Image (cartoon, rainbow, N blue to C red):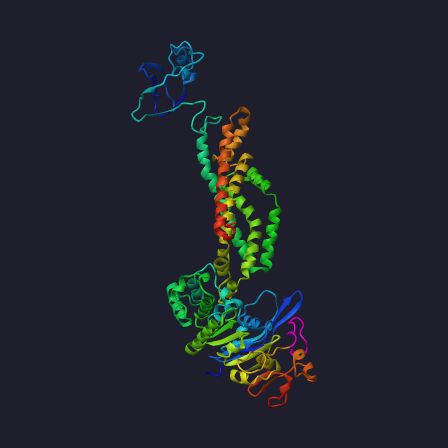
Amino acid sequence: MTDQPLLKLEDLVLHFKTTKGKVQAVDKVNFTLMPNEAVVVVGESGCGKSSLAKAILRLLPKNIETYTGKVFLEGEDIMRLSDEDFRKTVRWNKMSMVPQAAMNSLNPVLRIGDQVTEPYIIHTGASKADAIKQAKKMFGYVGVPEDFLNRYAFELSGGMRQRAAIAMALITLPALIILDEPTSALDVLTQANIFNVLKKLKRELEISFILITHDIATSSELADKVAVMYAGQIVEVSEATRFFTNALHPYSRKLMDSVPRLRGDKEPDFIVGQPPSLLNLPTGCRFRERCPSRFGTCEQEPPVVHHDGHLVKCWLYQDSKEAPHD
Amino acid sequence: MSLYFTSTFDQKKPFVGLSWIGPDGKETRLNNFEINNKFTYRFNQDDKVTRKLGGVVASTSLFSNLKDPNLKTHPTPVKGTYYLKIEAVTFDPKADLQAEMIVYGKLSGWAGTDYLRRDLGIALLWGTPIALMFGLLAALGTSLTQLIIAGIGTWFGGWVDTILQRITEINMVLPFLPILIMIGTFYNRSIFTILTAVILLSIFGQGIKTFRAVFMQVKESAYIEAARSYGASNFRIIFLYMIPRLIPMLIPQLIVLIPSYVFLEASLAILGLGDPTLPTWGKMIQDAESQGALYQGWYYWVLEPSALLMVTGLAFSVVGYAMDRVFNPRLRGQ
C-alpha cells in the first residue's frame, strides 16, 4: 500500500435547490480512502448517502445550489476538471459506479453484450471484438455465463442483472467502484453471492470499493472501514473491526443496536424520532434531538476528534481519551 | 380520328396517299396530300371523303356498310379487321416520315376519359405513386424530426427545452392551410416545394408534445442515469438510449399519419394548388369540378379518385391499428 490516498474528500458540499428551500444533502464531508480498501457508508434513508456518491462522480441533477469542496483522486483535484474532461478522464477510467436499483440500470432495448461493452468502447476506443473479449473476462469474474451477452435485460434474473451491472462497472478496470445499495431488493442467497463476488474482486483485482448500504450485517463481510452518515455529514469513520465491536458515536451505537443478533436476549433497538429534514437542519449537533447522551454543549457544532483510532464528530470525546461508559 | 405526321426533308415535301381497307377486303381511296414538317390529317374534316362516303362523317361511315339505308340515322358498325394503308413518296435520300393515328372514342379505357379525351386510368395510376410518396415522405420527415427534437429538448432541458416548446406552441396556433396557399400562390407549386413546406410547418406540432411527455418518463429511467455515469455522451444517450424506447410508439403513429398527408396533398390540388406538371388524384377531382362533371352526370370522374383516396386512408389506418396491437401488447386480448 502506498501512502497516497486513492480518494480524498475535503469539505465536499452538495446542496440542492428546491421550491421548499435548500436541501443540504452533503454537507462538508471529509473522508479518505486508501488503495485496495473497501469502505462501507451506512446511515438511514435520506441521510445523503446516494448524494455523496453522486457528488463524487459528479452525476448531478439540474437543481444544484452549492457544489464545492475538493475531491482528490490519486492526488489530482478532479473538481477542477471541466464537465467534458471529467466525463472523458474520470468516469469509468478511474472510478465507476453501480447505480442504485442496478437491476433496472440496463438499457431494455440493447443486448447485454452491447450494453456492457459500451463503457469500454467509449473510454478505450477498443474494437467491438476486443470489448466482447473483455466483457467475457468480466463475466467470468462476476459469474455470469458468457452466452448471456446475447440476451436482453428482461431475460435475466435480478441477481444476474446485478452481476451484469457490476461487470459493466468493472470492464475498464477502474481503481475505485462506488456501489450504491448493490444488494437491495435481492434475496439473501443472492446477496451473499454478490458479496462473495465483490470480495473476490477486491482480492484479485485490487479494486477499492465505496459500498453504500443499509445492511450493516452483510456489509461487515467486506468492509475495511465504516463511515457513518447522518443528516448529510459523516459522523464517524473507523476501522471495521473496531467499529463493529466498539462504535463511538451515539448514533453509530444505536445503529449497531438495531441490527438483530442470532443469539442473545437483546431485542433489536431503534432510534426514537425521525432524522432531521435536510431542508431545515438544527444548529449544533444534528443528532442532538434523538441522542440519549446529549448535554448542554451539544447546542454548538461538534468538533471532529481522533479517539481510539476512530474519527468521530461528537462532543462526548472532546477531551477524554477513553471510551465513555454509559 | 386523326393522323399526325412528322417529317424531315430537304427541299421537296413528301407526298402521301391514304386508302382504307374494310373487313370485306374492299379498298377505298381516301385522299392524297403533301406533308409539311408537322401535319395533322383529321378524317372527319375532310369534305372530299365525307362526300365520297355518302355524306356521313368518316368516323361513322368508314366502319359501316355504305348501302345500309339507316346509315344516317342508326348506323350499325361492321365488325372485323380494318386497315389503313399509308403510301408515301419522299424526294430526298435522307428524308424521313412518321405517322401516328389516334382514334378518339366517346369513352375508352377501364376508367373512362376526361374532357380532353385523356384516359383517366393513366391519371389514376400516375397519381398513386405520387400520393404515396408524398404521404410517406411527409410522415417520415415530420415524425423522425419531431422525435429527435423532442429527445434533444427533453434531455438538455432548461432553456433549450423552453425555446423548443415556445416555438412549438407558436407554430401550433399558426394557420397551416393559408400558409400553404400563400406559398402555392406566390412562390412555387412544385410538389417538392409543397412537401418541404408541409414538413417544415408540421415539425413543430402536436407530436413534439406527445413525444416529450414520454421522454420525460424515459429520461428518469435508472439505465439512463447508469449510461450517464459511465460517461456516455449526450448524443449517445439521446440516440441510443432514449429514441429507441419510442420506436414502438412511433411506428403505428407514423402509419396512421401517412394518409393524412395524402389527403392534405389532395386538398391542396383540389384548391388548385397542386403541381401542374403531375397528374394527381386531387388534380383529377379539381378538373372534374371545373368541368362540372357532376352536373353533366360524369360521376365516374369524381368517384374514381375519391375511391382511391378512401381506400388508401382505410388501408393505412387498418395497418396502423394492427401495428399498434403488435407494439402495445396491453391493447391485445380485450
Q: Is residue B225 visible?
A: yes
Q: In which quarter of the image is the N terminus of chain A?
A: bottom left
Q: Is residue B330 above or below residue A82?
A: above
**Residue B60 falls in which quadrant of the image?**
top left
> As drawn, which residue projects farthest toward the front?
A265
Q: In this view, does A175 lie to the left or right of A291?
A: left
> As drawn, which residue projects farthest toward the right?
A296
Q: Is residue B85 magenta?
A: no
Q: Is residue B97 above or below residue B153?
A: above
Q: Is residue B209 left or right of residue A165?
A: right
> Which residue is at 45% across, 77% downward?
A199
Q: In this view, does A62 lie above or below B245?
A: below
Q: In which quarter of the image is the C terminus of chain A?
A: bottom right
Percent x, y for residue A173? 43, 72
Percent x, y for residue A209? 49, 76
> Which residue is at 39% across, 12% downward?
B53
Q: Is residue B79 left or right of residue A233?
A: left
Q: Which of B313 and B44 is in front in this view?
A: B313
Magenta-tinted stretch? A272-287
Q: Which of A153 and B111 is in front in this view?
A: A153
Q: Specify the principal SS of the magenta part.
A: loop
